Image (spheres, helix red, strand yellow):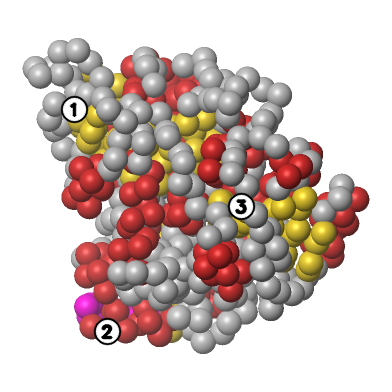
Amino acid sequence: GGGLMIDWLPTANRSSDWPQARVCIAGLGASGFSAADVLLHYGAQVRVIEGADSPSLQDKAHLLEILGAEVTLGAPEATLPDCDLVITSPGWRPNHPILAAATARGIPIWGDVELAWRFQQPDRIVPWLAVTGTNGKTTTVTMLESILRAAGLTTSAVGNVGRPILETVLDEVAYDVLAVELSSFQLHWAPSLSLHSAAVLNLEPDHLEWYETLAPTPAAAYAADKARIYHQVTNSCIYNVEDPTTEQMVVDADVVEGARAIGFTLGVPGPSMLGVVDDYLVDRAFIPQRRDSALELALIEDLPSSSPHMIANALAAAGLARSFGVSARAVREGLRNYELGPHRIETIASQAGVTWVDDSKATNAHAALAAIESFESVILIAGGLAKGTRFEQMVRQGRGRIKAALLIGADRGVVAEAFASEADEVPTFVFDCLEPQVMTAVVARAGELAQPGDTVLLAPACASQDIFVDYADRGDQFARAVRTFLTPQGGD
C-alpha cells in the first residue's frame, strides 16, 4: 500500500520535519551508506535494501542497525516497503522492480546528489560548478579543482569522484565552491539542481544497458539525462563547439534568466567562446572586449599532454572557473599544477624506442579513440565488457594509427567484428584466456610486434569486471606484465 504523501517533500530541505518521513534506501554502496547515516541523524525512519551480501556490507548494516535503521541484505527479490521517499544508488536501473514500484505509486525517487543538494538548503548553499559527458569528466573536474585552489578558494572535487557528495555538503569546512562530476545516472535522479555553471564535454552512446527500457530510445534517454545538467543553470552553460548535440542541449535548456551559452573549441574561438590561438588557450567569453580581443589563459605546454582531448578538458575547466570569476593567472597556475591520475594515458615504460602506455580508464570506445589519436603508431590492447556498445566508429577513425590489435575479454569477438568490417588490413590477435594472466601473453605478443616508434597502448574501450576487479586492477596487471617482460631474466 501507499502512505499519506508528506506535503513538504517537494520542497524538503535539511530543516524539514524528517522524523515524520519513512525513507527507503536502495543500495548500500558508499552513497547509500552516507544517505542512511545522514537521514538517521536527522530522525527519519530508514529502511535499507541491498541485493548483495558480503562481510563488508554486513559491517555497514550492523552500524546502521545500531543507529536505528532496518537493513535487508542479500535480497534481490525484495519488494518496496511502505515509504514516503526512495533514495537510490546510481547503479540501480530505473526498471528495477523497487524503483518501478515507487514510480507507479507516485513516490518520489532521489539520488544521492539530489539529497545533497536539498541538504545544503536553506542555510549552507555553496555554488556548484558541474561537469558531465561520456569522457573526460574526472580529468576536467580535477583540473577545475586545481584551478579553483590556485585562486585561493576552498573547494573539493566531488560527485562521481572522491568522497560521497553528501559528506562534503555537511562538512564542517566552509566551502566557497564545489567542483562536481555528475554521471547521467546521478542527473536522472536529481530534478531540483540549479547549478552556478555546467559543462557537457561530449556525448557518445555509453551505459545503454542502464537505459534499455527508457523511451523513446536508450540513446535518447541517456542524452536527455546529460542535458538535465543545464536545467536551471544561473550563470553559464558550457558546451563543446565540435559536438553539436551539446549546443542543442543548451538551446533546449530551461535556464535561469540571464544565463549565458559559452562554447569551447580546439580552433580559434568566436565571441562567447574559449579556444586556441597559436599555442595559447584563450578566453573570448568572460572579458568585456570579447568582440575584438581574447585573453591568454595558459600555454598548451602547461598541460600534462598536448592531446586534443586534454586541451578540450582544460578549456572546459577554464570556462567553468572563469564563469566563477577566477583570474587568468590562477587558471594558468592551476593547469600547471595539475597532475593526471593513474591509468589515464600513463606511460609505464619506454625501452628500445617502444613506449608502453596504460589507459585502462578508457572504458568505452570514445575514450579509447581519444587515446589512440594521441599517438602515431599504436599496438592496441582492447576488449572486456562491451556494455552493449559497438566499436566500428572507433576502428574507422583510428585505423590510420592502429598497427595491430590484441583483443581480450568477454566481448573480444564484438571488437574483432569491428576490425573485420572496418580495418581488415590491421593484424588482429584474439586471446581466449579469461584470467588476469592473459596480460602476460598479450604483453609478450605486443613486444614481438612493436618496432621503434610504436606505442603499445592498453585502451580497452570496455569495462574490466569480466577478468579484473576494476579498471585500476587491469592497469596494474598490465604494468606488472610490462615490467616483467622488459626485465631480462637471469644475470651474467
Q: Secondary structure at mark 3?
A: loop
At 58% from the left and 73% from the top, the residue drawn is 97
**Above-or-below relation of 367 to 18:** below
Judging by the rendered image, the residue that carries numbered circle 1 is: 272
Judging by the rendered image, the residue that carries numbered circle 3 is: 5
Chain-order first, disc 3 or disc 2: 3
At 25% from the left and 20% from the top, the residue drawn is 286
**Above-or-below relation of 1 to 428:** above
Judging by the rendered image, the residue that carries numbered circle 2 is: 420
In terms of depth relative to the viewer, which is nearer, 245 or 358?
245
Q: Is residue 53 visible?
A: yes
At 34% from the left and 22% from the top, the residue drawn is 322
In terms of depth relative to the viewer, which is nearer, 260 or 1?
1
Report which quarter residue 184 is drawn in.
bottom left
| Residue extending farthest top | 288
Q: Can you tell which of label 1 and label 2 is closer to the viewer?
A: 1
- Name the chief secondary structure element in magenta: loop
| Magenta highlight range | 422-429
Report which quarter residue 455 is drawn in.
bottom left
Residue 271 picture location, percent across and down = 14, 26
Q: Give the residue type that dot 2 points to.
A: Ala
Q: Secondary structure at mark 1?
A: loop
**Above-or-below relation of 107 to 180:** below
At 49% from the left and 38% from the top, the residue drawn is 180
